[in-house]
Image (cartoon, rainbow, N blue to C red):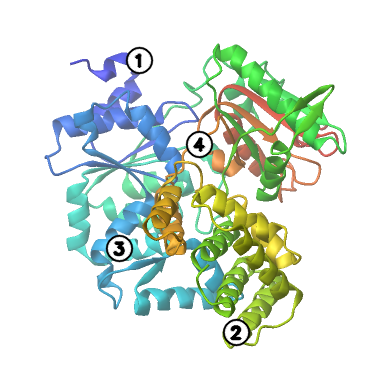
Amino acid sequence: MTNPEDRFDLCDKRRAILGDAGHMLVLGGPGSGKTTIALLKARRMVLERLQPAQSVLFLSFSNAAIRRILESAGSVLTRDVGRQVEIKTYHSFAWDILQSHGYLLSSQRTLGIVAAQDAAVIRAGLEDDEWLAEEDRLFQEDGRATYDQFAPRAADILERSAVVRDCFCSAHPLILVDEFQDTDEDQWRLVRALSKNSEIIALGDTEQRIYAWRKGVSPKRLNEFAETLGADTYDFQNENNRSPATGIAGYARGLLSPDVHLVLPDDIAFKRFRPGQFAIGLRAGLIKTWNETVKRTGHRDITVAVAARSRTMVRLISDALAQKLTLGVKEHGPVPHDVMFDQMQITLASRVIAYLLASQQNPRDERLAGALERISAVFRSSGKKTAIKTSDRLLGWAEKCRHGKVPSTKCVTALTAAFDAIDAAGFSGSPTDDWLLVRRALERADADELKRTGDHARYLRLLRRGSAIEDQLAELWKEAGTYAGAEAALDNAILLDQMTDSHREVSSISVMTMHQLKGREYDAVLLVEDQHRTFRGRDQEPPYMETRRLLQVSLTRARHFAYVLSATKNATLDVLFED
């Protein structure tokens, strides 16, 4: 059998990592080989030291990073070895602990999850200390945990119970932790507890610390790990194996040195669009990015990420790509693309549509009340005072409807008209077509509350041809000729998506925030800003180190080509390098 270690040029540092035992800290920039050496270490551990019931645990922050790790694992681990390497997020591992031993902290024997969108609704209008108290009550009395409670509760269990800690450490004698610079205090507590009986290898890079705004994240975390655990440190410095034949990595790394004068390499294009020309500039930039990447790779089976700093900008990009556009004399159709949103209002708005699908047989007053209650949650989840007032108003109307006193407000009248339009058209039994029927009825309604709900639901990425939720809705229709149960089916799909991020980019082009780029790889990356929503965000103090780190991470997601698109005014690269 071929040893995969023979395929790599292993320096003395890498050989020491493979041969030595104990806690280790492995540092290196994007593409430096941290993941590869970690997987090779896992392979040795499985072959030389593990018992059949044991496994190596590889922890990462995001499921996007996990998919990248799995892709790398395919070239390093055989199927037999891979069975003893578990790759999980902090959330999923912490949930394993809570599912098996959460009863030690809660009054309930079994625990449930407060979905992220429901947590947003409950939290709206509460002060931080009030929300913490409510989270504690939900956990202690109801046996329900929010995602934010997973790590601290799991850490509590491992710190308090040596028996439970020994159980998990025995199951995982070696634990690999990716992107360790971004761990918060509770995740660090979890790792410290496990380090008492398991070997920990942390992978990190101080220059990729783009989540400094998260509560509990410390710029000293990597040093804390090395000092607290007495870990040997191995630094791969500026090595890059992801795009070694390009100048992307060098330029991106140079951004972290404010005093260094940088010249754009051939692998990065920087263009500006004139005022009022955003859609044209975006489409031209995407065409250039696509064609240049096809030329460099020699094939058309490529992936392109289009990313911006803010979610608002992501919406603008998606809307622009969804429109027909004329460039010169040629008309270009809409661009198929995936949009990666994690906003609560999207899932809550989708719940409204699922309810309208499922409740067609309900009495009209009850159906109105249920819809208004769910629409109120869409607004409340934003947490803004005006939105909470709108939510309260909608709840008041819902209560009146439930008691047979339907108010003659513009919103309720428009909702009644939407019901009439839906009922007149009738459902066809095609989940996607019927979903669109309901969504468009809301979008066309003569009430802002309904229009905004329909607009939010446009960005749901779970419902597509061949998806699990479409299959479940089709099965409901097949069994009963109705969509009764659609709301529960949607909630289950959303919960699964939040826990496992089962989404895969189906289109060649994906639109997302720059923070979502982390852990992913694409053939090309197109970064987009306008004069109001720049890459700098709230980072307004020179030398803009937060922005520089974000750009460095974003650019190095590209294997072959990167394109930066800015407005002629207030372009970030101009601001960074102005004299």
Dot 2: element: helix
Q: Mark 3 or mark 4, which is nearer the start of the sequence?
A: 3
Q: State the mark number for residue 399.
A: 2
Please give the name of the residue rendered at 37% of the width and 28% of the height, measured from the top-left corner: 72
Above or below for 176 versus 367:
above
- Label 2: few (<14), some (14–19) or many (≥20) C-alpha neighbours in 10 Å: some
Disc 3 or disc 2, which is closer to the eye?
2
Choose between 554 and 382: the one closer to the eye: 382
Q: Is residue 135 left or right of residue 569?
A: left
Residue that mark 1 sits on: 9
Q: Amino acid at mark 2?
A: Glu
- Mark 3 and mark 2 in contact? Answer it, CB < 8 Å: no
Task: Using the rendered view, name the quadrant where residue 410 is placed.
Answer: bottom right
- Residue 210 in the image: x percent, y percent? 57, 44
Residue that mark 4 sits on: 505
Disc 2 or disc 1, which is closer to the eye?
2
Residue that mark 3 sits on: 98
Q: Amino acid at mark 3?
A: Leu
Q: Mark 1 or mark 3, which is nearer the start of the sequence?
A: 1
Q: Quadrant of the C terminus?
A: top right
Q: Can residue 267 be seen from the camera position used here? A: no
Q: Amino acid at mark 1?
A: Asp
Q: Can residue 382 be seen from the camera position used here? A: yes
Q: Is residue 145 left or right of residue 31?
A: left
Disc 3 or disc 1, which is closer to the eye?
3
- Residue 131 in the image: x percent, y percent? 52, 74
Q: Mark 2 or mark 4, which is nearer the start of the sequence?
A: 2
Dot 1: element: loop
Please give the name of the residue rendered at 72% of the width and 20% of the height, measured from the top-left corner: 263
Q: Mark 1 or mark 2, which is nearer the start of the sequence?
A: 1
- Label 3: few (<14), some (14–19) or many (≥20) C-alpha neighbours in 10 Å: many
